[in-house]
Amino acid sequence: MSYSYVSHLECPKCHKTYSDQEVQQLCECGAPLLVRYNLDEVKANWKKSDLSTRDTSLWRYHEVLPVRSEENTVSLGEGMTPFVHMKKLGQQMDIPNLYMKDEGIIPTGSFKTRGASVGISKAKELGVEQLAMPTNGNAGAAWALYSARAGIKATIVMPVDAPNITRKEVAVSGGDLHLVNGLISHAGKIVGQLVKEKGVYDASTLKEPYRIEGKKTMGYEILEQMNWEIPDVILYPTGGGVGLIGIYKAILELKELGWIPEDKLPRLVAVQAEGCAPIVKAWEEGKTESEFFENSQTSAFGINVPKALGDFLVLEAVYKTNGCAIAVSEADLDKAQKEVAQLEGNFICPEGAATFAAAQNLRKQGWIKENETVICLNTGQGIKYPETVNIENLPLLEPGDVIKG
Ligand SMILES: *Cc1c(COP(=O)(O)O)cnc(C)c1O
Ligand SMILES: [Zn+2]
């Protein structure tokens, strides 16, 4: 029995293979690398029932994670986030089987923690001492904190407009924080220069192969929480698209393991904001890659990614599952955020709210049918973005005043 059944890395574009036992970044051809496992051996040695005695961190799936030695895992207990039936909202939207996978309930308050836990554990296993990454905020926060736990130096570059709290999360961890007066793409160029000159490990989205492995555990958990039944639709707020690629990868692996039925795939939906919708544009035009989206803007900061390195993998997952890509307006996104709070008692992040707005639109169009099981991914805590809620004209009482009514 092995802790991990990792076999090698593979390029999804040119199929060149690489060892996971030394530092790897992109394939020679420029595409991101994916981790492959000896799934036949996993199948022979790992049973669903083994899960019942394991703790609830994402490391419960260690057989299909890339860290070879348990002592290298860097964990704060992340994983098995709530899977919530949204009864009242579902009724209003005419989707009675509407669920939310709530990634707000996780260390650092966003699902970026999953990628950080697995990515940094593998970096530690490979002896990495310093890493650098551009971020829209949440990834930098998670990677800085987990780097601190692992004893790795983290250099984080984020737009000056990124949520203030994520800046503080990096600062409190002792991370080497830099702000850039521009977008994540500008931060990426600055990190690229540092990587080239100083040889530090490049932890940019998909430039190391392991973040996606952390994010794929959302797929494993959703299936486990659904008792290994396949849902009809999963909606995902798509920036770099790593979570969507990861969920698709999880589903394919689970099929190979024989843990879920062969004959069905969930339709995967890439949700974007109208102000930054490169994947939606590509999907509408039937293309397999996206183009840089000029002057992108949205309050859903985590999905403000004008050009994703893994765009071709996101589009493949959408096409292969008969899914779709859809953009929502800022007004719809704000409205959905309030509805979730007012009907279901959960303050979700604007990115998560976008998936509910999209579900509503797709139901109205008839793309989602009434009795389908629909899962919206809430990727983070609303309380990380206090400025998305405006409060004006609150009554100010004097001591001793009485409230009427
Ligand atoms: C990063 C982020 C996203 C987008 O994730 P990708 O996997 O890169 O598409 C969505 N929501 C939040 C809150 C994020 O921080
Ligand atoms: Zn390649």
Image (cartoon, rainbow, N blue to C red):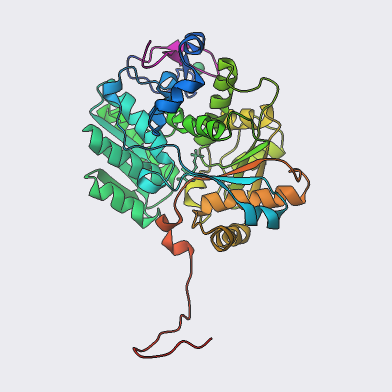
- Determine if residue 189 is in view: yes
Single out the residue that lies furthest toward the right.
366
Specify the quadrant of the image occupied by residue 135.
top left
Q: Quadrant of the C terminus?
A: bottom right
Characterize the magenta stretch by its predominant secondary structure. Answer: loop
**Magenta span includes 333:** no
x, y (%) of residue 324? 68, 38
Above/below status of 219 relative to 187: above
Q: In which quarter of the image is the N terminus?
A: top left
x, y (%) of residue 280? 65, 42
The mark tally for this picture is 0
Q: Which of 117 and 340 is in front in this view?
A: 340
x, y (%) of residue 303? 51, 46
The structure residue drawn at horizontal position 26% and vertical position 25%, both measured from the top left corner, is 128
The structure residue drawn at horizontal position 59% and vertical position 38%, both measured from the top left corner, is 291
Left-right relation of 302 to 129 = right
Above/below status of 298 relative to 217: below
Above/below status of 158 relative to 388: above
The structure residue drawn at horizontal position 56% and vertical position 47%, both measured from the top left corner, is 294
Left-right relation of 236 to 96 = left
Q: Nearer the viewer, residue 34 or 220?
A: 220
Left-right relation of 306 to 384 = right
Specify the quadrant of the image occupied by residue 278.
top right
Specify the quadrant of the image occupied by residue 151.
top left
- Determine if residue 152 is in view: no
The magenta span reads 1-20
